[in-house]
Amino acid sequence: MFTGLSAFPVTPLDDDGVDSGRLSRLVERLVGAGVDSIGALGSTGSYAYLSPEERAVAARAVVSAAGEVPVIIGVGALTLSDVLRNVDAAQAAGASGLLVSVMTYQPLTEEEVVTFFEDVAARSSVPICVYDNPGTTHVTFTDAMHEHIAALPQVRSIKLPGAPGPTFTDRVRLLRGVVPEDVTLGVSGDAFAGDALLGGADVWYSVVGGTLPEPAVALTRAAQRGDRAEADAIAARLAPLWELFSRYGSYRVVAHLAVLLGLTDTVAVRRPVRPLADATVAELRALLPGVTATR
């Protein structure tokens, strides 16, 4: 579950909340493309903007549509009590694993972060992936925190921020020395995925994989067999999309991409996040032939 390609789809929304039908079809598409796992209710899936009831609806829809493919469900929230409620709902829906982020408004001490994960792990009956993403959660992990948290029996993976090849490879090498050997290390930040996988990452937690699974699967498999030329070629075709990610945020861009591909009816972002400007949508539309090409 915590190796290969973990694809994170958008959560389609309509006037009544989560569009379960559209979400199920998105997930079935990922299953057909051969992804290794599906990440529901990550940042791409709007977890921070959905009510607990909407999150529960989405979790059930994804698990039902995924069949035998493992589903990792995000449970992050601002308070521990809300996180634990999300843990219960995700497990009730049949989650294979949990993506656990500690979000905060107030700065947290190392002890507060560590005890948070201890409490969540004690509640969880399925494996956990630790979400290390200071840009969105405002929590920065030290190596000592990772060492302590990764020693919890439920923790089986760490989702690390992407970084240029040598920097990420050095980071993986350092963490391998402090976390248990059965804890996988994964990359987020799609632009860095190929180099990270070739440099020792076990898993790519992928934004683009949730909407364009075929090239994401192909890039992952090329990197897994050590074919740098093929991995680089696929990454080069996707690079214009990742450049838009860097300018406007992957959350906005992928929400529009799903509409342009006919996968959703509406742009799945919620205020205060606003959709992209028309000129940017036109730019994205112009990129589609290149980023969707198989060769």
Image: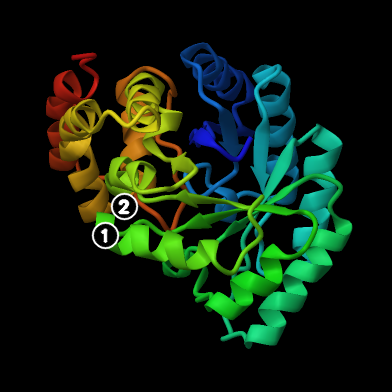
Read off the residue under disc 2.
Answer: 249
114 to 279, vertically: above or below: below
Q: Are marks 2 and 1 in contact (CB under 8 Å)?
A: no
**Foreground residue, 217 or 242?**
217
Looking at the picture, how far across and down is residue 102, in whole percent? 63, 67
Q: Amino acid at mark 1?
A: Pro
Q: Which residue is found at the position 70% from the left and 18% from the top?
A: 68
282 to 203, vertically: above or below: above
Residue 164 seen from this side: no
Q: Secondary structure at mark 1?
A: helix
Q: Which residue is found at the position 38% from the left and 42% from the top?
A: 197
Q: Is residue 61 left or right of residue 201?
A: right
Q: Is residue 125 left or right of residue 7?
A: right
Decide: few, some or many residues near mark 2? Use Cα within 10 Å; few <14, some 14-19, many ≥20. few
Q: Secondary structure at mark 2?
A: loop
Looking at the picture, how far across and down is residue 253, in whole percent? 30, 41
Q: CA distance from mark 2 to mark 1?
A: 24 Å
270 to 268, vertically: above or below: below
Decide: few, some or many residues near mark 1? Use Cα within 10 Å; few <14, some 14-19, many ≥20. few
**Foreground residue, 73 or 85?**
73
Q: Which residue is found at the position 23% from the left and 33% from the top?
A: 228
Residue 96 seen from this side: yes
The image quarter containing residue 272 is bottom left
Q: Amino acid at mark 2?
A: Gly
Looking at the picture, how far across and down is residue 130, in whole percent? 62, 58
Q: Is residue 164 left or right of residue 106?
A: left
The image quarter containing residue 60 is top right
Q: Is residue 111 left or right of residue 244?
A: right
Q: Which residue is found at the position 35% from the left and 59% from the top?
A: 168
Q: Nearer the viewer, mark 2 or mark 1?
A: 1
Read off the residue under disc 1.
Answer: 166
Looking at the picture, how far across and down is residue 116, in whole percent? 74, 72
